[in-house]
Image (cartoon, helix red, strand yellow):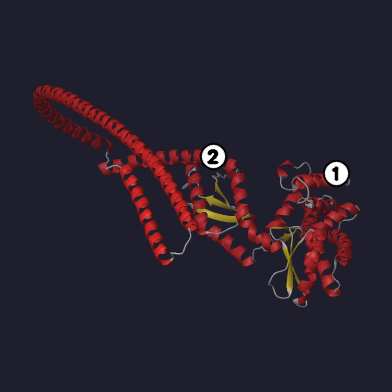
Amino acid sequence: MDITSILLGFLLGAIIFGFVAYNRAYQIGFSKRSGLDVALKEQAEQEAAALRERAQTEAERIRAEAERLKSEAERTLRDAETTAKERVAERRQELERDIQRERDTLKLERDEQRRERDELKREIERLNRRAEQLDTRGMKLDQLEEKLEAEYRELQVKHQEADTKLHDVNLKLFEIAQLSPEQARDIILGKLDEELEEDKAVRIRQATEKANIEASKKAQHIIAQAIQRSASETSAAMAVSVVPIPSEAMKGRIIGREGRNIRAFEALTGVDLIIDDTPEAVILSSFNPIRREVAKSALEQLVADGRIHPTRIEEVVHKAQEDMKTFIHNQGEEGALEAGVVGIKPGLMQLLGRMYFRTSYGQNVLKHSIQVAHVTGILAAELGLDPALARRAGLLHDVGKSIDREIEGTHVDIGISLAKRFGEPSEVIDAIAHHHDPENAETLYGVLVAAADAISAARPGARRESLEVYIKRLEQLESIALSFPGVSNAFAIQAGREVRVIVQPEKITDSKATLLAREIAGRIEQDMEYPGQVQVTVVRESRAVEFAK
């Protein structure tokens, strides 16, 4: 039974049910209301006719829908059959491809097994041939071994004969030389030691020369690293000044509103003003000592006055700078007066005063220059030279250090340029140019200034070293040198920068002198602590003295 028959049956049942219900309702209404007129009957017939039409229309629509659903069902069935056939065909193809791949794989495996069998067969044949060759070679080796054993026995017999003959020869040599074997061995070893000592000394000298050549190439790099590593503590101690303040409230006034006072102060002085937790103190930091001194003087005046604002800061800083120029000039005049030097031009006097703020290894450069002037004058007077000119050269020998931090060049080159600019005598210029290189000096004044410079710089206590430590170092240098055999005397000179060792010429040869100098230098490096370097000079001197009568 299809869908159309079901729908038609359902529709006819609905029509019959409606007709029966209508008749029933009509009969009930007629029995109860027999008095209804014909109009009502007609109206009922019309509604029944309308209901029949609607039922027919709905039945036709349901029939059309059923036909459409039947068509779609038939089409869906055909599509499903087609899809199923296609899937079956595809699955069949996949199975065929898988079977073919399995066949190809099996074929490859069979081919690989065939190749392995062939390779194994060839390897077995090669091993068999190798075994035959080894058997043949083993037989040959056995024959050679027997032959070598026979030759070895013959050689042993010959060696015994040679040892016997050598023993006889040695006995005859000992009888002729009248020496025992131990004595002969000692003589040979002694000569060998002397030859090796000479060769060792030559090799050490060559290695030292080569090391010096290589060291000169690396010196700048090593010195730069040493400066970088050791500069922090010294620079921190020499680049700051502490200014006391009456109370902590003064720090806020120094800073000013939004830091305007501190910015104005740093811009005018070129000095960093550090305000931290240090109680009742502020710190001024700068590598320029003159700027730092100007800033210190200005800040002390501002703290004492109490009025701190940008305009007042500018006035006080300018006044402090003018006062500093006067102070520098006065220091230069006092230094020249103390050194007994007259006729220095004002510009050069100002530069001389700037050395009051310059230090070298902790030694004040102006005080050092005054001391060099005095010593140079004394030496010149002893030699019959002009003491005044000598003192002038000694006072101005380091004048280049007054501005060597501000312009390029060494203090020697800067000093030569300044001396020429201010019309100083040629002797003074020569002393400035060669006070570190007296061998090339053109006048005696340069040599005297160099000697006085070394005396002032190397004197005990001049450069951060106490007298006790200085004397102890000299004694230790001499005691180390005297502890070596063959040393007759030792002298520590140049403020401990050099030790001269006098050796006994009959015990120390020229070759051993080189080794001795190296050993003493190594002991000094191991046992002592000292600034800079210590030069070890071994002196071997032979004298023959005779008197003619």
Mark identifier at residue 397: none
Q: Quadrant of residue 126?
A: top left
The reply to whether residue 444 is in sight is: no
Query: Where is residue 442 drawn, in percent x and y?
Result: 78, 41
Q: Residue 327: percent from the left, percent from the top? A: 86, 63
Instruction: Indicate the secondary structure of the residue bearing disc 2.
Output: helix
Most foreground residue, 380 or 375: 375
Report the Cα–Cα distance between label 2 and label 1.
40 Å
Q: What element carries label 1?
A: helix
Label 1 is placed on what type of residue?
A: Lys
Q: Which of marks 2 and 1 is in front?
A: 1
Amino acid residing under circle 2: Glu
x 23%, y 28%: residue: 96
Q: How crowded is mark 1: few (under 14 residues within 10 Å), some or many (20 or more)?
A: few
Quadrant location of the C terminus in the rendered image: top right
Write the residue at 87% across / 52% down: 348
Circle 2 packing at 10 Å, graded few (<14), some (14-19), many (20+), is few
Q: Quadrant of residue 250?
A: bottom right
From the viewer's perspective, is 525 left or right of 260? Answer: left
- Give how far across and how far down residue 41 sits, in percent: 46, 56
Picture quarter with the N terminus: top left
Q: Which of 46 and 521 is in front in this view?
A: 46
Mark 2 or 1, nearer chain start = 2
Q: Name the residue under label 2.
A: 209
Q: Which mark is residue 420?
A: 1
The answer to whether 265 is drawn above or below residue 202 in the figure is below
| Res. 55 in view | yes
Taking the view exactly as shown, the residue that stands out farthest to the bottom is 247
